[in-house]
Image (spheres, helix red, strand yellow):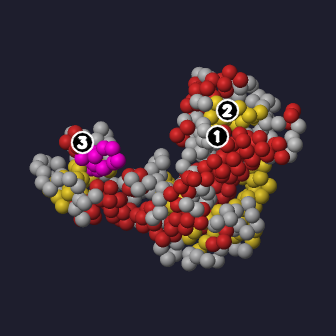
Amino acid sequence: MENIRIKEIVEACGGKLLCGDENKQIKDFSIDSREGNEDSIFVPIIGERVDAHRFINGALELNGATFTSEHDSASGEKPWIRVDDTVDAMQKVGTYYRNRLDLPVVAVTGSVGKTTTREMIASVLASQKKVFQTRGNQNSQIGVPLTLAHMTGEDDVAVLEIGMSERGQIEKLTGMIRPNIAVVTVIGVSHIAQLKSQENICQEKMDIIKGLPADGKVFLNGDDPFLAPYAGKLDYETWFYGMGENCDYRAEDFHFSGGKSRFTFVYKEQGQEKRIPVTLGSLGEHNVRNSLAGLGIAHQMGLDMELACQSLKAFQGQRLNRYDLTSCILLDDAYNASPDSMKASIKVLSEMEGVSGRRIAGLADMLELGENEKEYHYETGRFIAGTDIDEVAAYGPLAREILRGVEDAMAEKNVMEEDRITLRHFETREELEQYLLDTVQPGDALLLKGSNGMKLSAIASTLKDREA
């Protein structure tokens, strides 16, 4: 944060200064008592197990000030600010600071692909602008104000990611960051346990538009069956991106070549159709679709589209990264998983060129899918049965349903024994890891995909460390 004093923080959050210098400047928040500096204010969060107020004295050895909701008096040189709720206070200060900055903000949400889409938008815009983007995965009720604190007046544009876990959170976050452009990627089943249906998830994600100004723009995935129907129904200028003819920004001639995704970017300018060949550093049709959001926003911002398209060639995000190891070709997509993202990654593995050995899917449970979790895993297995995968090696109780779905689908199609996908289940991640370490061979392509809690990233790290 730039040029923010304690006095302004007190006013922004409706708090009361208990002690300390009201003219002291603050530049950042700290939510860890072991971190911070003289320019940061400690935010003691009351969690399910720990109330961080007990760490305030220790935090003030590093931090320059603190919030509190449990003290009515304090003394000392360092400012203590009494508030009703420390997280709410941090959010109000983040909102106050964002309102002081005059720069366009792009906000991205969705059940699947929001992080990659955010990174791609930032990458495309960075070809011609100074871009600030969400740091790490700070897209929550706590993460967003932490991110806002690092925006500066020197940035030309900010690309921020917002997530949710229950109803009402998107509206609160979009009100905090006040985006000029809102992007919704996919309506999937992540958090369906909390929201009960995809229709409810769609309504929650579309709340992102509630933070837009009257001249705001909306970018929606035109290939998504829940988002496409919004055509002509919003009070904002709305643009669709995707593969379909209904999309304003679309990709044609998509194919893999040389370990990259290649397509033709198609859009209109002054009524005339324009076409630019694009090479994308990430694999998969779903990533091509994600990149279209960035290209569409670049076009609406008036950027040079040739330069914007060229910027994607070097793009490497956090998801679905390819590593050409001596032991195998590794597709590391172990960061997280949902039915949509798992199917997309399986499709990439199935369609990869240059695979002389087996195509092996190392899978694990997809978590937080609610009461229909077994059905979602089973359907994913039936999808796999229709691909060119040679083997599925999985662990976790829900992963058994993936294997059952593959088995049932192959049986219904009367697949010959020699053409069947090999299915293996392991009780622990360690057993799966040992099996893969012992059996993968040069020429094989191995995909690792599962929810973050299943920790398949540990297997990816072991495989990569063996190369050192």
Instruction: Give the x, y percent position of residue 285.
Output: 71, 51
The residue wearing badge 1 is 399
Quadrant in which the N terminus appears:
bottom left
When asked about the image quadrant of residue 91, the answer is bottom left
Q: Residue furthest left?
A: 75
Q: Position of residue 196 (x, y in %)?
A: 55, 60
Q: Where is residue 392 in the image (x, y as percent from the top left)?
A: 72, 36
| Separation (CA) of disc 3 from disc 1 | 41 Å
Q: What element carries label 3?
A: helix
- Residue wearing tag 3: 55
Of mark 2 and mark 1, the one earlier in the sequence is 1
Earlier sequence position, callout 3 versus callout 2: 3
> What secondary structure is the magenta-colored segment mainly?
loop
Magenta-drawn stretch contains 317: no
Q: Are marks 3 and 2 in contact (CB under 8 Å)?
A: no
Give the mark, 3 or 1, whose residue is nearer the N terminus: 3
Q: Distance between the residues labelled 2 and 1?
A: 8 Å
- Count neighbours of disc 2 (C-alpha within 10 A) and say few if under 14, some if 14 to 19, many if 20 or more: some
Residue 348, placed above or below residue 7: above
Q: From where the camera sits, is residue 220 visible? A: yes
